[in-house]
Amino acid sequence: MFVHKLPKVRAITFNKYGSPTEVLRAVTYQLPPLTPTTLHLKFLASPINPSDINQIEGVYPVKPNFRTLGEHEKTAVAGNEGVAQVIGVGDKVEDIKIGDWVVMGKSAFGTWRTHADATPDDVIRIPHEGIGIVRAATLTVNPCSAYRMLKDFVALKEGDFIIQNGANSGVGQAVIQIAKAWNINTINIIRDRQNFQELKDFLKSIGATYVISDKDLQAKNREFEWNKDIEGKGIALGLNCVCGKSVISMAKLLRHSSPLITYGAMSRQPLTIPASQLIFQDLRFFGYWMARWNKENPKAKRMEMLNDIIELIKQGKLRDVVCEENNWGGDDKEDVSDDVLTQRFLEIFKKATEEFRGAKQIIKMI
Amino acid sequence: MFVHKLPKVRAITFNKYGSPTEVLRAVTYQLPPLTPTTLHLKFLASPINPSDINQIEGVYPVKPNFRTLGEHEKTAVAGNEGVAQVIGVGDKVEDIKIGDWVVMGKSAFGTWRTHADATPDDVIRIPHEGIGIVRAATLTVNPCSAYRMLKDFVALKEGDFIIQNGANSGVGQAVIQIAKAWNINTINIIRDRQNFQELKDFLKSIGATYVISDKDLQAKNREFEWNKDIEGKGIALGLNCVCGKSVISMAKLLRHSSPLITYGAMSRQPLTIPASQLIFQDLRFFGYWMARWNKENPKAKRMEMLNDIIELIKQGKLRDVVCEENNWGGDDKEDVSDDVLTQRFLEIFKKATEEFRGAKQIIKMI
């Protein structure tokens, strides 16, 4: 057992559901002492994901863990994803040692904080040689979702085509790269925007086969540049994180009896499906939720997936998501007040909800 | 080979797509002589189904067969379903004899006529002892759709619950009765209406477990009379022929990971699905189309289904759909002009499209 001075934990918390700008506040408390069966973690980096925001708003099905933290009662630490380094290991803990990097074993751990105590079950150790902290901090949600959606709904063969909207999202970028690594072609829909050509070039640079704006998709009326490529095989899978009516024109392009998977609703609209796409085109509409997959599948299967993904990262085939790294400063190197820390965090948070920002916000704790 | 005087065929036809009231007209032509490999049919009765109307409008994926009938060029006979009696059999035809009853082997045969020549492949012989002509004329679409949707999407066990909207439709009534015969419970949603109690009593009399109006379903907010019955097992399957936003409250009641099958869109609205029902409730949305099933499955499997259904009819477990029988008079007993016949047909057709009429229109040719 490594004895270290118990650090002060600085955490972004909420004690009731609501708009994050209103309910989030930084708190400071003493890390509880190590026990023979626990670990001490020092967080390196955590992203701000859309589901974190939904969870704070109270509309996410995985509820946070409201508990007592130091003198703060019924408080939940926000954040579901992140990477931490092990800085303390209880005597009876096996297979984990000081210096290891770990990601979260389940949702709602509370990752927007500098330190935490944890049980070995709370975490999954990852081999981190050759992986930066940003990629490690965003390993378990986006790349894993992309991996599963490409694998679990239809048996894709090399050369097959898939189509996705919101293609510049974190999942979208992972889909492009994993598909490319598996020799699957991607047709990528993004919203029309000022820097369209720049974003198109970027997505092509990471492996996108085709990129089209939602506006062009509607306007082109089936005369697409990929028509020759898909002749005789069509498009075998659709991935949707936008919802609303715009999905209709994407779904129309799928070959009969294909699955269309919804994993988000960035338009904040319900999905609209013409009955003919169900009845005559025989499309099948499924949802995908990483948290359910994690719950329903054994840890061994999850490890297998993480190892596959880490291998792609090491081979340079899965790059960091486009992000902005924010030095939160919530570390005990610096002794700012909780109020200052709250304000700093909300500045980062604002960027995470900005339309067309086009970058995931990462909170760095080192 | 039975030699009979070749009858005049009187048929409801169209030579271009459009509103049925504008494009349908009765024509008269001579039945072609029998050949060694053909049959002569005399139609007994044919229903007017929603898909027949869509086909005339040109919006149904199964296109009619435009051809020359007597002196009428590029003409299609309307109607996809019906029952006919065999009145002539070519020398080389096996397994079919004069007097047999047949239903259509595929869509788009053209069943709104008094007689037809056919090949043995065009038809399926049915044992008709103990089956009335109305039930025989409406055998291949509604009961078969109900049968398949109850069998093919989830393994239902005795005592399970399913839910359906448009429960008084032809398919809906078949679902209630086939489910009852298989000891499956049905929760049936119908639109609120003046004679609600009367319709509710009728649906219960044919086997509905529960009947509720769409208005009550929205209003009750989860305090339903069936809640105790479904405890611990939930509702395992949803059937939808309405679409629009009203499906949301039905889908909400399904247990996690259940299928919701769409086979119609009586509201003429697309289906609207909140992303949360896909992502968090994990509902799976499929379409069902009898014509596709028929195309993709061997005749033996279809015969097995028809025999099962005919057995239920003989046991009194599947009654005639609520219908109005219309003596069209399109027979050579009566020698009215084509114009009179067109007008007579359009009177029947009008009833078929009337809201809340609550009865399928059957054209009788005998």
Image: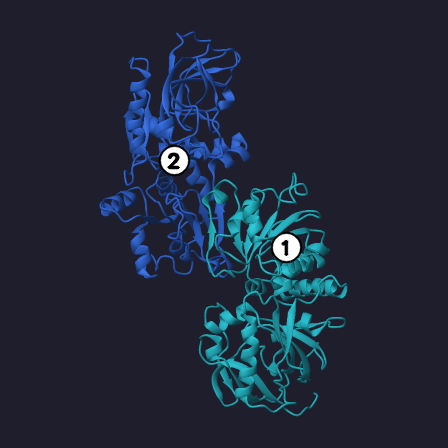
Chain colours: A cyan, B blue
Q: Which residue is mark 2?
A: B50
Distance between the alpha carbons at the discs numbered 2 and 1: 38 Å
Q: Is residue B266 left or right of residue A154?
A: left
> Residue A3: which disc?
none
- Find residue B342 and report its horizontal and vertical position in percent: 32, 22
The amino acid beneath tag 2 is Pro
Q: At 67% from the left edge and 41% from the top edge, which residue is drawn?
A: A228
Q: Residue furthest front?
A: A194
Mark 2: give few (<14), some (14-19) or many (20+) Cα within 10 Å: few
Q: In which quarter of the view is residue B170 placed?
A: top left
The chain letter under disc 2 is: B
Q: Is residue B132 visible?
A: no
Q: Is residue B288 above or below residue B341?
A: below
Determine whether the residue tagged by mark 2 lies in a helix, strand or loop: helix
Determine whether the residue tagged by mark 1 lies in a helix, strand or loop: helix
Q: Is residue B247 left or right of residue A164?
A: left
